[in-house]
Structures are given as C-alpha cells and as structure tokens.
Image (cartoon, rainbow, N blue to C red):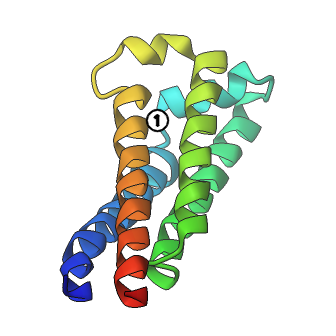
Amino acid sequence: MNPKFFALPLLTIQCTLIFLWLYQGLIPKVLFQSAAEISIWQNMGFELNLAKILVGLSGMAEMIFGLLFLKWNRSISLHGLNICALIGLLLLIVLTAPIQLTTAFNPVVMNIAMLMLSVLAIQLIKLEQQQHMA
C-alpha cells in the first residue's frame, strides 16, 4: 500500500484537533469567558477575579497545546498526551461541575470525539510506519 495513503486522513485529524483546541481555548475562555468555565475554577476554591484570570490562562494553554499538532503531526506521544489530557479534563468536570454532563454538546461528547481522533491518528501513524518498514 502506498504510504501516502495515510497522509490525507492524518492531515484531516491533525487540522481538526488544531481547530478544536484553538476554538476551545479562544472562544469560551479568552474572548468570552464562559460562566461555566469560571464556575469550574470557583468550585475549586478560587475567588472570582482569580478564576477569570485562570480561565484565560487555561485558554491560552489549550491554544498552545493545539498548535503543537502543527509541529509534531506524526507524534504518537503527543496524541497519547492528548488522550490523557482529555480524560483528565473530563474527570475534572465530573468532580467540579457534574451538572455540565447533562447539557447539550457537553464535555463527554466533545472529549470522547477528540480522544477518538487521537486514537485513530495513532493507529494510522503505526500503519504508516509499518508500510515504511515493509
């Protein structure tokens, strides 16, 4: 099988993850500071002003993380870190704001979808590596 066969699906996954991390960092955390995002930090014991700062900082961290997929687009480790981060963020919601799990387009939906993109990317990267060795 032609190794280029894996290039387009991997590119699609990478671009999707980049977009989703950038969007999730920029829109509800940096530009518009969602009340739900602020409440998560407040539920962890931070006062309102500090919670708002932490929301912005977490948004910037998410955007930086998304941009890592530009540089390391064939990194199994980065995808593994993505999987762990998404599981961790989902557990954080379970512990700090479980009511969010009942809303439309909730963290369960988003995190599992993004997590599965990384699972698929890892599978494709491994298949691509096997093709190069054959």
Residue 51's place in the image compared with 70, above or below, is above
Q: Position of residue 22 (x, y in %)?
A: 42, 62
Left or right placement of residue 57 versus residue 50 in this view: left
**Residue drawn at the location 50% of the way across and 28% of the way down:** 35
Left or right placement of residue 4 versus residue 59 in this view: left
Judging from the image, what secondary structure is the residue with disc 1 in? Answer: loop
Q: Position of residue 93 (x, y in %)?
A: 58, 24
Residue 132's place in the image compared with 94, above or below, is below
**Residue drawn at the location 34% of the way across and 41% of the way down:** 113
Q: For the N terminus, give its image quadrant.
A: bottom left
Residue 104's place in the image compared with 6, above or below, is above
Q: Nearer the viewer, residue 54 or 75?
A: 75
Q: Amino acid at mark 1?
A: Ser
Q: Position of residue 52 (x, y in %)?
A: 65, 41
Q: Nearer the viewer, residue 13 or 60?
A: 13
**Residue drawn at the location 58% of the way across and 61% of the way down:** 60
Place residue 65 in its image quadrant. Answer: bottom right
Q: Nearer the viewer, residue 117 or 58?
A: 117
Q: Position of residue 55 (x, y in %)?
A: 62, 44
Tag 1 residue = 34
Q: Residues within 10 Å of mark 1 (few under 14, many from 20)?
A: some
Place residue 20 in its image quadrant. Answer: bottom left
Residue 12's place in the image compared with 49, above or below, is below
Left or right placement of residue 69 versus residue 77 in this view: left
Q: For the C terminus, give its image quadrant.
A: bottom left
- Number of marks in the rendered image: 1
**Residue drawn at the location 39% of the way across and 66% of the way down:** 18
Farthest-out residue, front: 134
